[in-house]
Amino acid sequence: MRLSRKMSRLGTETAFKVLAQAQSLEANGVDVVHLEIGEPDFITPKYICEAATDALDKGYTHYCNSQGLLPLRTEIAKKYEKTYGISVDPECVVVTSGAKPIMFYSILALLEEGDEVIYPNPLFPIYESMINFTGAKAVPIQLREEQDFRFDIAELRAKVTPRTKLIIINSPHNPTGSVLETDDILAIADIAQKYGITILSDEIYENIIYEGKHNSIASLPGMLDRTILISGFSKAYAMTGWRLGYAVMPSELIDPVVRLIVNSVSCTAPFIQYAGIEALTGSQDSVRKMVDEFRKRRDLIVDGLNAIAGISCLRPKGAFYVFLNVKKLGTDCRQVANFLLNEAGVATLAGADFGMYGEGYIRLSYATSLENLKKGLDRIKAAVVKITA
């Protein structure tokens, strides 16, 4: 069988590969601390599960509107009005099976060969994968630790060309946990408006922020009409396996994106969408409690890592990741990650798996218990001593 050449341009997520390796070790009796997978370890709140069960009992198990159920799209629109003061038409909301499909569909609908996309690097790998898949040119902008892993606005301006069609932003950011500040957002919006560039704003971690409030670029004057705003239920409501995401996007993108949905998955399961309605309209106490617990975990792991000679990390302002600087260990980050897994029983991800500017770093997810984090810290400390011996 001869595959299409474009398949060679399609990347993947290493997290699932490392998870499989860790599970293989566990099957052979090795105790592994999982710090690789980016998903909350909390269970989905009971009221959300009950809403899905109720919808199943009522027979919401058939095809539905490919754009998403109007009641859910209406609640999503209300959310943005209430939270960010953005007046959203429910007809400009699309519901999908997770947030990833929005990246996939939007990039497919927008880009052609020769178009350029500026995106943060280190990055969530799917951005670069999909840009390359379309044949467009991927233009990375380096996120530097000395700048708190935020955009260098002067560098961003310098990378814009007449072919720049899309700028991708992700705040709070995976893998670094950085958060774009108000001045950053204003500057990016100014560039987008000046040069007529569309923004794809991945805001899946919008609820998991520890200092201040989340800034959505779509809330700025004139930006709603040039922003594809992505979010979903996976992170805030511990619903990763439910696969429920959505986007607010310019009206001219709705039809092409819906046609891509029709051609691929037909629709998002309606009983899951009813669970999404309940998530948005029900009590948000579980979200607040989860974020409070993540803050405790963040502080524990950051303080613990910075107490180990030879490694260091910034204190992330959002999401649930630490981007650990391992440059002083004198070996590349993949070797460090492999050593941690195979010799210390700690599953992590090499920074290089998040793009070329991730070399020298390790991503750790602290979406696990304080007990596991303490165990992981002890093992990392012992491993660093062996590596530097």
Image (cartoon, helix red, strand yellow):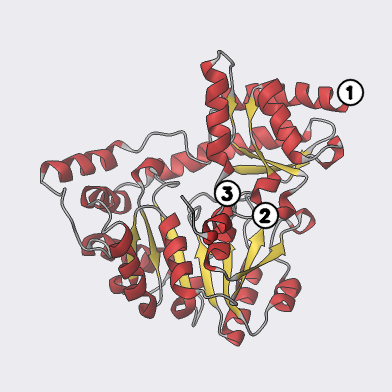
Q: Earlier in the sequence, mark 2 or mark 3?
A: 2
Q: Earlier in the sequence, mark 1 or mark 3?
A: 3
Of all residues, the one furthest to the top in this rendering is 29
Of all residues, the one furthest to the right in this rendering is 389
- Residue 216 visible somewhere in the drawing: no
**Where does the image place residue 361, in percent across and percent down from the top left?**
74, 44
Tell me what residue is drawn at x 57 percent, y 49 percent: 210
Image quadrant where residue 371 sits:
top right
Tell me what residue is drawn at x 76 percent, y 53 percent: 145
Tell me what residue is drawn at x 57 percent, y 67 percent: 168
Q: CA distance from mark 1 to mark 3?
A: 37 Å
Mark 2 Cα shell of 10 Å, populated few (<14), some (14-19), many (≥20): many
Looking at the rendered image, the quarter that the C terminus falls into is: top right
Q: Earlier in the sequence, mark 2 or mark 1?
A: 2
CB atoms of marks 2 and 3 within 8 Å = no
Q: Amino acid at mark 2?
A: Pro
**Where does the image place residue 152, in percent across and percent down from the top left?**
73, 67
- Residue 154 visible somewhere in the drawing: yes
Q: SS of the residue at dot 3? A: loop
Q: Amino acid at mark 3?
A: Tyr
The residue that label 3 is drawn on is 210
The residue that label 2 is drawn on is 122
Task: Give above or below for 299 relative to 65.
Answer: above
Q: CA distance from mark 2 to mark 1?
A: 30 Å
Eye-nearest disc, 1 or 3: 1
Is 169 left or right of 1, judged from the image as shown? right
